[in-house]
Image (cartoon, grey):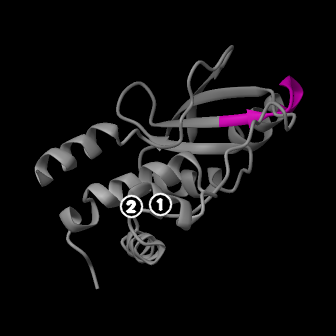
Amino acid sequence: MPFPPDLLLDEINLKIIDILSRDASRPFVEIAKELEISDATVHMRVRRLMAAGIIRKFTIATDNRLLGYDHLAFMGINIKEGSSDEVTALLSQVDEILEIHEMHGRFDLLLKIRARNLDEMRDIVVNKIRRLPQITEAELMTVLKTIKEEQSVSLKRDISDATAAAT
């Protein structure tokens, strides 16, 4: 049964999402205590958020550099007209490609690639990406330093708005 978005994104649910986005391993009992609701309520709300597709999965955040993946790059590529679905399906199979974005601007697609070293990055670019005949242009942009990298948007403003609307 679908739930109206305004019901799913009330103040409590926004706070639950915010807490879990910072620490997906946080026990529901702790979340319930912080929000002053029952752990059964937290569990039920999380199930509904998952059923609605708002929460897609629970995961961990790793330090890729400590895992030995020191090299991060973005690659802008242009492709032959009408080949987007085919190209993105092929690129989605490359483990080292972390993200694929369809773009409006200079490039058709923007890829986020992570590798252990420059030799591995070169192998990914030359043998797994540029070999695709649908690619007409490619530009690799190597990251020198990552200043900020988040996986979830901050919900502080949404929580504040929901709190104000409830009063």
Kind of residue indicated by mark 1: Lys
Q: Is residue 99 above or below residue 92?
A: above
> 65 or 98, which is in the foreground?
65
Q: To which quarter of the image does residue 53 belong? A: bottom left
Residue 34: x and y in percent read 45, 54
Q: Which residue is mark 2?
A: 36
**Residue extending farthest top:** 144
Kind of residue indicated by mark 2: Glu
Q: To which quarter of the image does residue 26 belong? A: bottom right
Q: Would residue 15 appear left or right of 139 to someone viewing this image?
A: left
Q: Would residue 104 appear left or right of 68 to someone viewing this image?
A: left
Q: Is residue 119 magenta?
A: yes
Secondary structure of residue under mark 2: loop
Look at the image and give the residue range highlighted in magenta: 113-120
Residue depicted at x 59% and y 56%: 24
Question: What is the spatial separation of the Cα atoms under label 2 and label 1, in whole angstroms?
Answer: 5 Å
Q: Is residue 21 above or below residue 104?
A: below
> 46 or 100, which is in the foreground?
46
Residue depicted at x 40% and y 36%: 103
Question: Can residue 133 be seen at all in this image of the molecule?
Answer: no
Task: Give neighbour class at mark 1: few <14, some 14-19, many 20+ (Cα, 10 Å).
Answer: few
Q: Which residue is mark 1?
A: 33
